[in-house]
Amino acid sequence: MNSLNALPLLIAAVLAPLAQGVINRTKAIVAGRVGQPLIQPYRDMLKLIRKGAVYSETTSWIFQAGPVAGLAAVLCAGALVPLAALPALAEFRGDIVVIAYLLAAGRLFTILAALDTGSSFEGMGASREAAFSALAEPSLFLALAALARRAGTASLTPAIAAVSARTWTQAAPALCLVLGALLIVFLCENSRIPIDDPTTHLELTMIHEVMVLDHGGPDLAMIEYAGALKMWVLGAILVGVALPFHSGAVWIDTAIALAGIFALAIVVGLIESLMARLRLLRVPELLIAATILAALALVLVRR
Amino acid sequence: MTLLLLSLALFGAGAIGALLSAGRTGWPDRVGVAAAVAAGVVGIWPAVRAATGASTESLRLAWSIPFGSFFIELDPLSGFFLVPVFGVCALAAIYGFGYLRAYRGRSTAAAWFFFNLLAASMVVVIVARNAILFLMAWETMALSSLFLVTFDDENDEARAAGWTYLVASHIGTAFLIVLFILLGRGGGSLDFDRFDASSGAGLIFVMALVGFGTKAGFFPMHVWLPEAHPAAPSHASAVMSAVMIKTGIYGLLRVLTIVGAPEAWWGWVLCAVGLVSALAGVLLALAQRDLKRLLAYSSVENSGIIAIGLGLGLVGTASGNIAMAVAGFAGALLHVLNHSFFKSLLFFTAGSVAHAAHTRDIERLGGLIKRMPLTGGLFLAGSAAICALPPLNGFASEFLIYMAGFDGVTATAGGNVAIAFAAVALLALVGGLAVACFARAFGIAFLGHPRDSSLPAPHEPAPSMLVPAIVQASGCVLIGCLAWRVVEALGPVVRIASGLPAASVAPALASISGPLAFAGAAGMAAIVVAIVLALIRRWMLSGRRVRNAVTWDCGYAYPTARMQYTGSSFVQPLTTVFASLLRPRRELVEPEGFFPQRASFESDTPDPCREYVFEPVFRRAGRGLAALRPLQQGQVQLYVLYIAITLVLLLLWQLA
Amino acid sequence: MNAMNQAVDAILVMLALTGFMLLGSSRLTACIRAVGAQGILLGLLAIAAQDGELSATGIAMAITSAAVKGVVLPALLLRAMRQANTIREIEPLISYNLSILLGGLGLALSLWLGGQLQLPTQPASSLFVPAACFTIFVGLLIIVSRRKAITQVIGYLALENGVYAFATAVAVQMPALVELGILLDVFVGVFVMGIAIFHIGREFNHIDADRLASLTDQ
């Protein structure tokens, strides 16, 4: 483990809000507007960090621990995820499980912080978040298990490194199915359309935005940063599977990975602009479809 | 061995002492608790020593019962299962001392008699090596826990729960009797070391699975768990859920070691039973509003997870995949230990809540964390452990079971891959649903505003009820951080359970304890990062204005506590998705007219297995057997006549 | 694995996905499009599975069957649908989520069956028999569990598609007469059913198979 392994985490920590900015800019351009500058998320976070805080009398220490726990969980999960061809900070057999359960720990504290306010709005968001992320877990595990079987190891960095251009010529259908399942899980975990709308402010239609309704100031900055970081981390897995180019030189690999992630951000922006949000009753069907895609991928990889 | 016998004697002395001092108030409690704690402290040392493989001791005494002998043996497997017995019984006794104070009006002597008897019988079950001794101890265990369940015998529910428990327990014991007959038939003796399982190993496995599975709470034999565990007082529920269920797992493992090399389909069946139990348990737990019933269904879920680990281990052994076998068995065994820690912790804190707020219904609770901060924090620790969040102990055991699953996915071929990837996917689903379940339990009961203002204001419980919970919580954290050391120490136990030679077990264990150490380190790193972030946040807010206000209520003028999300609303998305499996009952009286007088909505989720499988069968059996009613007229002369006729018939048969 | 085998694999995977689409969607247009897509996929499959021995009749047959099953029959069904004035399926006897779950189990069963069956000629891909069995299973499930008569026709088409896929697996090139016979059978069946549905709808103002059961004597 040399110092170069810290590169994926550092890049994620610095550039994650920029990916958010790219998505917002894409949506604005498709809608015919000029849109925010690309660095607007940084400005928003800095503005929030400089503010004070207001806490509800109903809440307890859990409300203040929620954002902290969420951000800590995503940071530690990010240390285990490679950025395309750049290996992660730590890799060991079974780190797939650790990543998924660290994200689940962050999610538990976010849900509890939402329930702590004693408001039905946050309760609504918490209940939907709990349900949909539970239904998305099998597809995430199955998709990563398909990659693990292909590579013969249960660790994420070697599994993604084993996806080369030759793998694409040999097992293209399986990899397409894995990408499809991972994309749906990505959209669910990051609360993007068609599962959730990050720009709506009607409580009855939100999932993630309504859970953090009562947070403000540095807490909200941490939550937004954690959200951007989670999107970067999950996107890095997608890009690693989709762009199988390993050149061996650090700068070229980094450039390719960054290009991939910003391309993914543009794709997400296009999806958000061109599709409508699903009715909440239909979201479980979408997640079951993702599980079926991942299961079919595993069937193909099995032979 | 002498220390073990001493602990048994102490339990016995405690039982009898509690009965003898029944007249004086307070003395049965003191005698019972002191004996239990002393026995636990005395007994845990030989248990740990045996589990880490120092030696195997045995004791064999003759007995006048035909086929019976007082043959007990303390090998690593027994020692490992004895550790939670002694630990949880001692702590539960301390907890019960404070808990039963509320029942001061009635005599608690019987409760302490049966508690010590239960503990002693569990010890004998785990060390017995003769079928007669085993069955007698098993029956004593069932009966003493039955009397603990019906301790609150003025409550109709408790009595009905006792009946269900009695019937289920005896159905399981019937299968066990058949099992021991099959095993002893070949060798002509009922001692475990003379059992011969060469013929009909498959049937023996099925008998063991049903008989011990009834005690362990596998689906569909679990229907007694959610009735019996809530009805018992909380210290007894903790013992039953955290330890007594594990005697079923122990029995299954013991039969597997006797039978020898497993066939492939055993692993498949056990894994399938485990997957169904885990999924059914967590789904039904999601739908409960009684806090202790929720914890009981969660025990069903965890028994399922242990069965998944055992099943994957058997598949690995049968297919020669040593890594998968060792990971599966190690994970299942570690989960047995972990579950005893966090389930007893959860029952202790749930009992404190029920004790303080006088209700177990979470829909009437709320805001408890402000009035009972320590209990709330301990319940949160237990919930995080049972949801398998790093770095607590639940994560370590589930990590090992996932390792077994991933080994199956990457390394094997054919049908084993299918069961391995089904295990991984469904285990992930169960994990996500468990997070939802315990977020609901903790969030609705402890957070927000109190929903029912008619309940008395709760307060922290007495230290005797807090200390056991604190001990278990620290155990969860310690085992979670040092899981890799615990797993390495489990070598002898895994060797016996899996039947693999020691030479292959040790390197396989070493190869999984490495990743386990890294996983634990990742969890601890998350905690360190969280602390650093909390300090940064405090520094950022230090100079600024921090105010209090009300929760944003959209400008509504009269917000009430009843507008908060309820437990059943919280899980409504999930119960709708799984409605065809859960079959919730809904009664809706819609508001009519312009000024509706009456409108109500009730929803309920009865156990589908009980509703649609067992109740119809038992009802039909009852109707059929009602034809035999005329035999019981209640007159003594008739009964004497029956006895006389039977004796005459026996005499004639013997002469012929 | 050469490119032709990969193409066959990809087509079979898409066939399975259309099966799931059929099980899970409540909108009739989506179901009709799914079954039309199955027809086109089967035409492509017939060409890809021949693996180099492409004869003129073979290609012509494939294109004709793709055209009929992928374009003509869906158009007929859409017309019948519009005339009967139905757009959505009402809640079926087995809910959508449960149907998808049963579909998953059916897929697992088909995979197992594919491994067990001994065929005289080795099919081009080991996914052939499972995908065909799965499509037959989907067709049967839809006929049995849906309420509207049009959806039952769609199920019948899926069943025929599954049987055709199975035949393609076993005998790569069937005599032209057999292929024409199958096509005629499907075409006439749908045509007759379409006319029947139109008349039923006109007479009873609905096409619910459930309510048609009340026509019996009891």
Image (spheres, coloured by chain):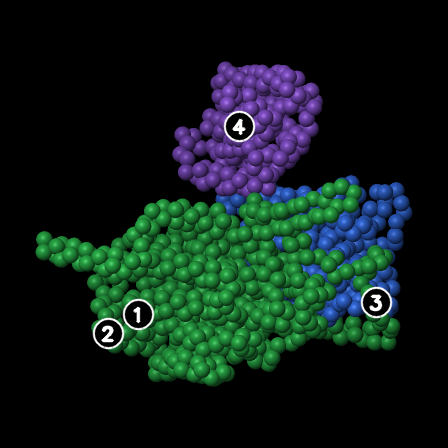
Chain colours: A blue, B green, C purple
Residue B147, quarter of picture: bottom left
First in sequence: mark 1 vs mark 2: 2
- Left or right: residue B382 compared with residue B487: right
Label 4 in the same subunit as label 2: no
Q: Give residue C159's mark.
A: 4
- Amino acid type, residue under disc 2 in the picture: Trp
Which quarter of the image is occupied by the N terminus of chain B? bottom left
Q: Give residue B63's mark.
A: 2
Q: Is residue A67 above or below residue A241?
A: below
- Amino acid type, residue under disc 4 in the picture: Leu
The reply to whether discs 1 and 4 touch (Cβ–Cβ < 8 Å) is no
Q: Is residue A127 above or below residue B527?
A: above
Q: Position of residue B426 (x, y in %)?
A: 54, 52
Residue B218 seen? no
Give the residue at mark 1: B133
- Left or right: residue C188 compared with residue B246: right
CA gap between label 1 and label 2 equals 10 Å
Q: Give residue B549's mark.
A: 3
Label 3 in the same subunit as label 1: yes
User: SS at mark 4?
Assistant: helix
| In-front residue for pair B9/A68 | B9
Q: Is residue A92 above or below residue B415?
A: below
- Residue at 84% over, 72% down: B546
